[in-house]
Amino acid sequence: MGALDFMKIASRNKRRTFLLVLSLILILYFIGRFLDYTFSGGGFYTLLALAIALFQSLISYYVGDKIVLASVRAREPNLSDYEERQFVNVVQELSIAAGIPTPKCYIIDDPSPNAFATGRDPKHASVCATTGLLKLLNREELEGVIGHELSHIKNRDILTMTMVAVLVGAIVIIADLLRFQLYFGGARRRRDREGGGELIALLILFLIVIFASIIGRLMALAISRAREYMADAGSVAITRNPLALASALEKIANYSRPMQVSDAVSHLFISDPKKRGLSEKDSLWANLWSTHPPIRKRIAILKQMAGLSA
């Protein structure tokens, strides 16, 4: 794999993200249509679920970054500290290289090495790193990690994941409304010339209740994993140093103690803060339920970008 193959990887993952988002939209549409048809809702259930999900997502979109930073007890960097000052300098330098405004910088006092970016767009963004990351990595490795986070900002990944949250949230809300109708309201009987139509509809609705939110969640996780690959490729585009990021990921993965953070923010970090080690499970089932791709696979791809064997 050549050194410029990050462009192919980014293009492939953009297509994958588009197809997954389109699939979520189609799932939501058909669930809503079927629910309204069964209960003679006339579009009410679909519109109600979308309205609730949209309201929740708007709150998350405009103040979500502040909520996230507060939840991890992030603070502003101490510029008299060498490592924290170097972190700020790297963010400033790479922001120029990436062609985006310099995001705000924050520090988490945690020995576990990790970092994340948050914010709704490049003009309203923040990059946060742990003290453990700043102590563990050299400057080139830190540049690889910061390049990854700036790529998330440049690609507006927060916007993408907010849109996904709207769709998945709407699917879950529709499933809850459906469950409520089944248990308390009951389906409005519809005439069926051949008979048995209502029973078939109820069976299909039961399957929707079980699988709708699961499918939506799996698709959201798949999109999250695709965005991580894109951010790795984006870091290479900014720094032109895939081996630095590969080395950083290896050091991060080999740190034995996980972070104590909420599951709600785990997907934001460059490495899953709840998992550690290059020996993490790489089974299909484990990957399906993971917010991040296997770190070993990410390192292998980065080494291939540099023209080395995995």
Image (spheres, helix red, strand yellow):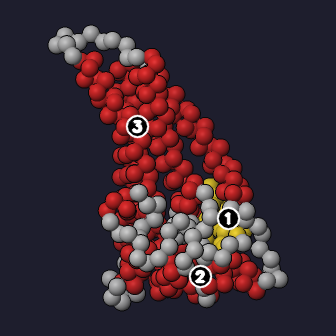
**Above or below for 21 versus 108:** above
Give SS at disc 3.
helix
Which residue is rendered at x = 75% and y = 82% of the image?
Answer: 85
Give SS at disc 1.
strand
**Above or below for 2 versus 265:** below
Question: How many labels, in total?
Answer: 3
Q: CA distance from mark 1 to mark 2?
A: 16 Å
- Determine whether label 3 and label 2 are within 8 Å by CB: no
**Above or below for 213 versus 11:** above
Q: Is residue 105 visible?
A: no
* Residue type for callout 1: Ser
Q: CA distance from mark 3 to mark 1?
A: 32 Å
The residue wearing badge 3 is 28
Front residue (pair 218, 151): 218
Q: Residues within 10 Å of mark 3 (few under 14, many from 20)?
A: many
Quadrant position of residue 112:
bottom right
The residue wearing badge 2 is 143
Which residue is rendered at x = 61% and y = 71% of the image?
Answer: 115
**Above or below for 85 versus 178:** below
Q: Is residue 281 visible?
A: yes
* Residue type for callout 3: Leu
Give SS at disc 2.
helix
The answer to which of marks 1 and 2 sits earlier in the sequence is 1
The answer to which of marks 3 and 1 sits earlier in the sequence is 3
* Residue type for callout 2: Glu
Q: Residue furthest front?
A: 257
* Residue 126 circle label: 1
Front residue (pair 294, 92): 294
* Residue 162 circle label: none
- Determine whether label 1 and label 2 are within 8 Å by CB: no
Q: Residue furthest right?
A: 80
